[in-house]
Each structure stands twice: as C-alpha cells, then as structure tokens.
Image (tube, grey):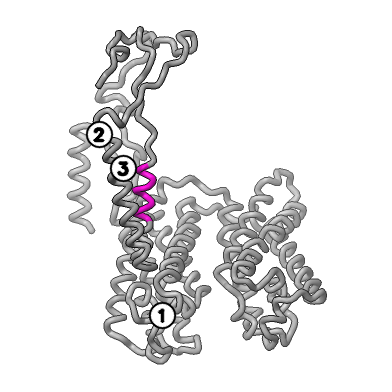
Amino acid sequence: MTSNIQEAPPHERQTVEMPRPNVWPMVLGLGIALMAAGVALHLAFLAVGLAIFLAGLAGWIGQLLPGRGHHHEALVEPEKRAKPVEAVTGMVEQLHPGLPGYRFQLPEKVHPISAGVKGGLLGGLVMMLPAVVYGLLSEHHSIWYPVNLLAGMVLPGVQNMTIAELEQFQLTLFVAAVVIHVVNSLVFGLIYGVLLPTLPEIPRPLAWGGLLMPLLWTAVSYSVMRIVNPVLARGVSWEWFIVSQFIFGVASAGVVLLQRMPRPVYAGVLGGIAGGILMPVPAILWSLANRHGLWYPVNLLAGMVVPGMGKLPLEQLEQFDSNWLAIALVIHGLLSVSFGLVYGLLLPKLPPIPGSVAWGGLLMPLLWTAIAYGLMGVTNKVLQRYVDWPWFIVSQFIFGIVAAVVVHRSEKIPVPPLTRQGEEETRRQGETDAGNP
C-alpha cells in the first residue's frame, strides 16, 4: 500500500521505498550447506540442514508478502542531494554498422572448443605415465595399484580392500577409473580452453619461480632423504612440503623482480633469505595441527644429514634438541641462500613463459590436487593415506603443462560483431568446426 507521501510529485517526496533488510537468504544458504555436508558426513547434518532450510524458506516467503518486504527511508537534505544531470547532445558520435568497434564482443579472439578437448585428452594421456612408472617402481610392482586408487575416489568399499587386492586387476574399478579420468580430463581441458586466454600475463621471474623452485627443491629433498634416511622420509607430509616450496619460490622470485638495480647476486641472496623466512610457516602449521609440536619439522629437516634418526620414537622427534636445531638452521640457511643465488643469476636470463602455459602449469596442479586431496579426505581418509602424493602432483604438473601448451598453440578464431552478418559468420564457423574435428 503506497502512502500519500509517496504519491506526491517526485520533487516533493521526502522518503524513498527501499527493500527491508532480510536475513532469511543467509539462513536458507546455511541450511543448504548443512544438507550438502550431511551427504558426506552424517545424517544428523542432513536433518538439521533440512529444518534450517525450511525455516529460511518460510521466512523469506513471508518477507515477500505485500506490505512486509519494503520500508520508507528518509531522503537527505535537499542541498546534499545529487544535482540533475543535464544532457548535452552532439558531443559524441554514435557508432553505426560498418564502423570499427561496432557491437564487438570481448575478447575479440578465442580458442575453439576443440582446443580444450584436444588439450584435455592429450594431457590425460600423458599424465598416466608417472602413475604407471610409480606403480612399477614402488614396492607394489603393479600398474593396477594407482588405477584402483583412482576408482576409490568415488566408489565405496575400496578402503576395505587389502594391499594385495589393490595390486590386482579389478574390472569394475578399472571401468570406474577410466570414466573418472576421461571425464575429468575433458572438463579441465575445456576449462583451460575457456579460462587461459582471459588470464593476464605473469612476470617472468614469478612464472619461473612458481614452477622451477617447487620442482627443484622438492626433487632434491625427496631424493636426498630417501637415500640418506628412507624411514624418516615417510614421516614427512610431502603435500605440505610442496606448499612451502611454492611459498619460497614465489617469495624469492618476487624479491628478485622488485630489485631494479643490476645486482643479481644481492637480489638472489635477499630473495633466498625472504623465501627462507616464509617457507617454514606451512610446515609449522601442519605440525601444530597434527599435534606434533613445533620442533618436529625442524628435527625432520636435520634428519636429512643426521643418520639414525629414522629409528627414533616419535616422542623424541617432537622434543627440542639444540644440536638438531643448529643442524637444521645450517641446512635451511645454506639451501635458501644457494637457491636464492640460482634465482638471482638464472631468472633474468630465462626466456619468458607464455601466460597461458604459466597459468596452466601452476593452476591445474594446485586446483586438481586440492580437489582430489579434499574429496578423498572427506569420503575416504583411509584411501587418502595409500596415495603417494609427490608422484600424484608430478602427474598433475605434466597434465597442466601439456594441456596448456596444446591450448596455447591452437589457432584463435575471431569473434564476429553482434550483427546479423556476424551471426551468419558464427553459424558458418560452427559448421566448419563440426566438419573438421
């Protein structure tokens, strides 16, 4: 019902009708979130979420009833109100068909859908190689072990299988793994084809720093620890370890990028120190979250060169030891400064990486690994411990780089203007693509 004040002429109105503040959409969203959590966690979440959802829906509908969803808000004083906009004609020439820029779509050139499909399929084909190599070289000596683990991401009951059963060929698990792998490869390939052309260029030091350092330092640490102390290597959470390497790489590359003066040694040392200060943060957070204490990751780092630490009980590795602390600080400082120098000397000389390849090599490994790790951690924590995550992440890097290269090298097609002629060109281009898969 409209008041007499609102029926007055616009220049005499002192209030404006505004939507009333409404909390029910947030209540409705909370109910939906709890119901989704109940599917994976417990039926109690589902029941509580359903009750909250119904309450939020009823409250929201009630707010939409006549006379309840709006209120009249007083206007500010006349001298504080915006002045009327006076139109001035003849100042800007209007575009019309035939002029450059008339009704263009942005971006003006895009990759065809076939580029994402080809990139996803080729990346999915190549990324299987690390999984097969891992299956053959590991203690399982079976190519079916990683296949069955992949199927276990969505199929229940796989976590109850023995290691011997996981090493055998299982037709149901094989079919499920193939479907999962092909679908995910196609989906992420299409995401690459659509998303990568729209992302900005990454500065050369950051692109190489985000790719080079995580791979280089993780490979060195993983190899050295497995040779010097293979028992202790199993105590390292390698997924958190790799996160710390990303932090070091980006921090060091950022410092090198900001140093405008031609002093690569100084910039490298400074970048190594900055990255070395920041990179222990994920390790400390992981250790505290798992109740290992502050000194557990420090002692594991010292175990790279101290023999016999793999035979020590967990309680002793969680205690403070001044000798181990000194050794860990020396190792960390030397590696940080050394890799920082490599950055300072090498990064300015490396060729630029195309933005799509840099994003593809960084985005996909992080995105797909996070999805797989999080999904498996919710649905199947037992199976999550069976996965060798360093090898898994290597396969994601391979997929990301291969798919990004395929998309980057594909020819872009122009997006025609939004005219009838442009629509006809779009239709003809679509028929051409359908005839040339």
- Identify which residue is drawn at 61% across, 55% down: 250
Amino acid type shown at disc 1: Pro
- Identify which residue is drawn at 36% across, 22% down: 72
Q: Residue 146 carries which label?
A: 1
Vertical arrangement, residue 169 with respect to residue 409, above or below: below
CA–CA distance in space, label 1 to label 2: 57 Å
Secondary structure at numbered mark 1 = helix
Residue range in magenta is 24-33
CA–CA distance in space, label 3 to label 1: 49 Å
Amino acid type shown at disc 2: Leu
What residue did someone put label 3 on? 59
User: Which dot, 3 or 1, sits closer to the camera?
Assistant: 3
Inspect this view and state whether residue 410 appears: no
Residue 279 figure quarter? bottom right
CA–CA distance in space, label 3 to label 2: 10 Å
Which of the two labelled residues, at mark 3 and mark 1, occupies the earlier sequence position?
3
Residue 416 covered by magenta stretch: no
- Identify which residue is drawn at 37% across, 68% down: 42
Residue 258 figure quarter? top right
Q: Quadrant of the C terminus?
A: bottom left
What residue did someone put label 2 on? 65
